[in-house]
Image (spheres, grey):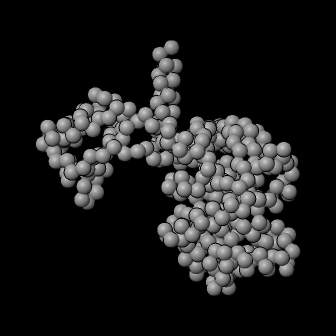
Amino acid sequence: MERGILARGLTKVYKTRKHRGWLRVERQEKVAVQDLTFHIPPGQVTGLLGLNGAGKTTTIKMLSTLLAPTSGELLLDGIDMQRQLLEVRKRVNMIAGGERMVYWRLTGRENLWYFGQLYNIDGNLLKRRIEELLHLVGLADAADTVVERYSKGMKQRLQIARGLINDPSYLFLDEPTIGLDAPIARELRQVVRAMAESGKGLLLTSHYLHEVEELCSSIYVINQGRLIAEGSPADLKRLTSQERIIRMQLPSLPADVEAGLREMAREHMARLEILASDEVITVTLRHPQDLGGSAATTVVRTGGTLLKLEVVEPSLEDAILALSDSLQRQEQEEEVGHGTR
């Protein structure tokens, strides 16, 4: 028996009805997740990444048994997650970002008591568990304050305690640090790391890719519900190692300079990004060749001033964007091919 959560061919299709006129109803299907296969082992943090709408939250809801898959197989330590829901729900939980999933008119302690009773945890054990969790997330002094008086960070910490109330073997974290101040987010990452070291299996989705890179041993990347890449953070960054990233800073960007850079990018089929701030203009070029010399020459020739030029190592964010762009170009080429037949 392979330990961990194993998904094979996981698919979720939403069926909707759209009214056309007074009498006609058109049935539509939206594929949110398509044929996903992945493994969440115990004792480590696994990442699930993708752009907005990629299917990450839908996947987590299926893992949490909040949504039933349309097809596919889900196993938890060999247990069929769809057939043994009660057993599975004792061993999994989820933490979502934002301020959902807690009751604002109850105190922090009352919230944890309520959710603990849903899991049929023995009263004395539940009391001890609540005290442990309140101290773990730093809410012991605010335990008897109603949640509507909590700050955003305190509400999120209460959510973490709620997600741990049943001492789950597997925990799913959907944007857990969104909206948190940097010190609180750092504390949460320490808690996540400690949970993995204690043997729990964790799945993390986050738009803050630095924390994914810091915490995750392996990452799955999805796009439009489909798996497009998997591997360690280093593996994924190597996928873009053939792309050279040239970053320049200029005090301003006159029209002639911008036009010259855009023309150069078109000639080399390079990606050009321009970001303006109050003090400098940052221009980024992405291409398999080192275009630094050509870019610098173009800036000077068109009357610009170059403050800084550097070659940047690809980041995890660069890897995700490159994978998504590559897939988009492939789909466009396929559409053009179909259109010419």
Horizontal and vertical percent position of residue 121: 84, 71
Left or right: residue 43 versus residue 20 is: right
| Residue 282, above or below 296 | below
| Near-viewer residue (34 or 208) | 208
Within the image, what quadrant is residue 277 found in?
A: bottom left
Using residue 235 as the reference point, say whether residue 312 is left or right of it.
left
Q: How many marks?
A: 0
Front residue (pair 107, 233)? 233
What x and y, as percent, mark residue 151?
55, 77
Q: State the image coordinates of residue 105 (x, y, percent, origin top left).
A: 66, 79
Compare residues 46 and 93 and report the one nearer the observer: 46
User: Is any atom of residue 302 visible in this view?
Assistant: yes
Asked whether, in this view, residue 273 is left or right of residue 305, the answer is right
Of the 4 image quadrants, the one containing the N terminus is top right
Q: Is residue 30 above or below residue 164?
A: above
Instruction: Report the residue at 86% width, 57% height from top.
Output: 87
Could you tell me which residue is drawn at 29 percent across and 35 percent down? 291
Q: Position of residue 64 (x, y in %)?
A: 73, 55
Toward the viewer: 302 or 57?
Answer: 302
Residue 102: in sight, yes or no? no
On screen, residue 334 above or below 306: above
The residue depicted at 12 percent of the width and 42 percent of the height is: 303
**View extreme (top): residue:** 341
| Residue positioned 58% across, 81% down in the render | 149
